[in-house]
Image (spheres, rainbow, N blue to C red):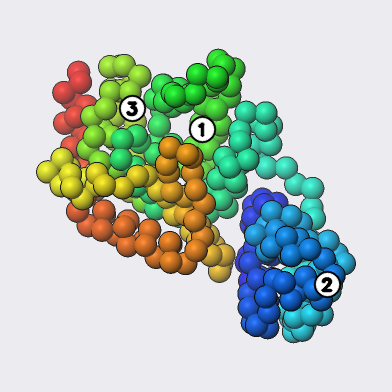
Amino acid sequence: MATRTSTLLMSRIGLGRALRRLRDDNDMTIAEVAAKLRCDESLISRIETGKRPCSHIHFSRLMTLYEAPEPEREKLAQLHAETRERRQPWWSQYSDIISANYERFLAFEDAAERVLEFQFGLLPGLLQTEGYARAVTGVGFDSLGPDQVDGLVEVRMVRQRKRLHDTTRPLVCMYVVTQAALEFQVGGREVHRQQLGHLLELSDHERVAIQVIPYEKGEEGCQIGGFMIFEFPGDMPEVAFGESVAGNAVLDDPRDLRRMRRLHRGLTAVALSESDTKSLIMRTRDRRN
């Protein structure tokens, strides 16, 4: 059972996964369930993936079909009620500039309690200064206008406040980046220097761990793209995002998640310690003065 989460999307995903587990426990296929409920298979599939809300009628029929015990039925009924609430997340005001995929990412980040992330050439979004974020936003997307860039940078800054600073539930962040991410001059000399100083400040944050893979370990960190794994409270399954030129791909297959975890452990093992990383950031910043 998933615990109460912070967004409508997460409630739907939690309910969908609980319904899928019940279907698996009853050894039924989506086609069999759809036939029993006299609906399209796509409807059951979209409910289980959280892409569509479950109606009261379908929820009642599913509970009867799966013979859910009363205690579990009551918990699922509460979760189902949450999926029907008209709650608007903070990013809804930016709906004109964020994509559906980015909205999904924000929902996962907002509900997570820990993130494991690796980045090769850029610093993680929650660590970026406004100048750095502005420099990288819209690169390769010439169709973005100044207002859209401003809005996307603002979204990134709000993410930082909501998950790291002005919050009672700060996200636990476990970051691994390559030394190249420190060395690339993004936004010009002064923006770069300020970004390195900001990293030094964040390295003292009790919920942020930053480790750098040095150049001499290059073969360990140059063969994969960026990725992140979100962990949630309760028994909500993990979700990963893998980065590519086509955008972020959502990965929730247990096999993919195990592979991502192994990758992150391996990258962490070859990276410098947090204290040695801080010294490297300081030396890099001082060279820029």
Q: Is residue 275 left or right of residue 93?
A: left
Q: Residue furthest left?
A: 216
Q: Are marks 3 and 2 in contact (CB under 8 Å)?
A: no
> For the residue marked with disc 3, what is the amino acid?
Gln
| Label 2 environment density (alpha carbons within 10 Å; few <14, some 14–19, many ≥20) | some
Query: Above or below — where is 91 with respect to 235?
Result: above
Query: Above or below — where is 93 with respect to 229?
Result: above
- Which circle's residue, 3 or 1, is located before the other in the chain? 1
What residue do we see at 32% from left, 62% from top?
Answer: 262
Q: Is residue 167 left or right of residue 45?
A: left
Q: Are marks 3 and 1 in contact (CB under 8 Å)?
A: no
> For the residue marked with disc 2, what is the amino acid?
Leu
Name the residue tied to disc 3: 195
- Closer mark to the observer between disc 3 and disc 2: 2
What is the C-alpha distance between the residues marked 2 and 1?
43 Å
User: In terms of secondary structure, where does tag 3 sit?
Assistant: helix
Q: Which mark is residue 156?
A: 1
What residue do we see at 30% from left, 40% from top?
Answer: 120
Name the residue tied to disc 2: 37
Q: Position of residue 22 (x, y in %)?
A: 67, 77
Q: Position of residue 47 (x, y in %)?
A: 72, 61
Q: Position of residue 238 (x, y in %)?
A: 50, 61
- In the picture, residue 256 is in which quadrant? bottom left
Query: Above or below — where is 119 with respect to 128?
Result: below
Q: How many labels, in total?
A: 3
User: In terms of secondary structure, where does tag 1 sit?
Assistant: helix
